[in-house]
Image (cartoon, helix red, strand yellow):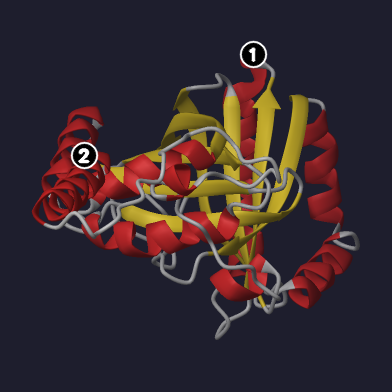
């Protein structure tokens, strides 16, 4: 893009100079191209050619980017388990989590539950969906506190953990809703810490880019944080195996527009992390 702009500028200057030579009464003023900031602190004209500006918004990005028709709220949990307790932890979760998922009194669904294979070791990741948003979350947590089986589960689970953290998320309107799928699959959770103020710009580019990542149905879900670590984005992908992941990701570069999406979104990222995860027996995402 930069090359095309410079070529266009050069062509215009050459035409102007030829006009001067043919007609001495024509005056030409050539504005210097400078990449240094002006005295008033604004970016120079030259720099503005290459920077995409986003119009100011008068609404929270959660209202602009999230799905509005279903009001789903998601909770993602990261549990770092004592290495010697991972097997017992998984067995305990397999006994309790599906019962919460299937009980109609709880307006929540277990979307998926995994162990990290590559990335942070001895870690469990759980993703829950609350249909009805914050009121549904509050209702579920209130009822679970009165559930003796669940409280016993929490106590036993606590003895197996080194640490735990969670985030409340909304799903991007342009991503698929994560639904149960057959396996076996491996899952990749790519997490991006964005620079504050860049979520709208990220959404603008990915609304187009996600259309280029649907060939193998690898796109599972896309989310952004509301509570917990803020300006955090999670993209969840499914692949048959690591080689399938490699082939699918490489094929994206064959599509027109993918290179542009990567070029413009990378500068928005402060930190990024990839986890390769294996579904547990209790996971609806196999």
Q: Residue at x 40, y 46 (%)?
A: 31
Could you say which quadrant of the image residue 284 lies in? bottom left
Q: Residues within 10 Å of mark 2 (few under 14, many from 20)?
A: few
Residue sticking out furthest to the top: 84
Q: Secondary structure at mark 2?
A: helix
Q: Residue at x 64, y 66 (%)?
A: 61
Position of 78 relative to 127 (above/below): above
Residue sticking out furthest to the front: 25
Along the line of sight, which residue is nearer the eye, 262 or 119? 262
Q: Earlier in the sequence, mark 1 or mark 2?
A: 2
Residue 225: percent from left, percent from top: 66, 53
Q: Residue at x 24, y 59 (%)?
A: 26
Give yes or no for contact between labels 1 and 2 (Cβ–Cβ under 8 Å): no
Quarter in which the N terminus is drawn: top left
Could you say which quadrant of the image residue 174 lies in? bottom left
Viewed as shown, does residue 178 lie left or right of 144? left
Q: CA distance from mark 1 to mark 2?
A: 57 Å
Along the line of sight, which residue is nearer the eye, 2 or 100? 2
Q: What residue does disc 2 label?
A: 3
Q: Is residue 130 shown to the viewer in this render? A: no
Residue 126: percent from left, percent from top: 59, 46
Viewed as shown, does residue 233 lie left or right of 263? right
Along the line of sight, which residue is nearer the eye, 197 or 47? 47
Viewed as shown, does residue 44 lie left or right of 103? left
Q: Residue at x 52, y 47 (%)?
A: 234
Q: Residues within 10 Å of mark 1 (few under 14, many from 20)?
A: few
Could you say which quadrant of the image residue 215 lies in? bottom left
Q: What residue does disc 1 label?
A: 84
Tell us which disc is closer to us: 1 or 2. Answer: 2
Disc marking residue 166: none
Residue 46: percent from left, percent from top: 42, 44
Position of 148 relative to 254 (above/below): below
């Amino acid at each position: 893009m930069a090359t095309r702009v410079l070529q266009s500028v050069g062509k215009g200057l050459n035409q102007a100079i030829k006009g001067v030579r043919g007609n001495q009464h024509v005056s030409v003023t050539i504005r210097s191209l400078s990449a240094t900031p002006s005295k008033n602190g604004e970016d120079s004209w030259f720099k503005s050619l290459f920077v995409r500006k986003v119009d100011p918004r008068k609404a929270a990005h959660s209202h602009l980017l999230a799905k509005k028709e279903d009001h789903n709220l998601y909770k993602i949990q990261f549990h770092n388990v004592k290495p010697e307790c991972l097997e017992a932890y998984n067995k305990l979760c397999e006994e309790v989590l599906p019962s919460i998922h299937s009980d109609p009194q709880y307006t929540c669904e277990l979307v998926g539950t995994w162990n990290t294979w590559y990335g942070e070791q001895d870690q469990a990741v759980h993703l829950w969906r609350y249909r009805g948003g914050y009121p549904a979350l509050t209702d579920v947590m209130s009822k679970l506190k009165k559930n003796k089986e669940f409280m016993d589960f929490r106590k036993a689970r606590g003895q197996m953990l080194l640490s735990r953290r969670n985030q409340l998320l909304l799903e991007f309107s342009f991503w698929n809703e994560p639904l149960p799928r057959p396996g076996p699959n491996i899952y990749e959770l790519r997490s991006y810490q964005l620079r504050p103020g860049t979520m709208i710009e990220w959404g603008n580019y990915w609304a187009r880019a996600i259309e280029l990542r649907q060939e193998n149905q690898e796109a599972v879900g896309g989310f952004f944080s509301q509570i917990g670590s803020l300006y955090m984005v999670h993209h969840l992908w499914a692949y048959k195996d690591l080689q399938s992941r490699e082939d699918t990701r490489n094929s994206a570069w064959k599509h027109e527009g993918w290179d542009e999406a990567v070029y413009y979104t990378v500068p928005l990222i402060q930190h990024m992390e990839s986890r390769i995860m294996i579904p547990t027996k209790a996971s609806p995402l196999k």
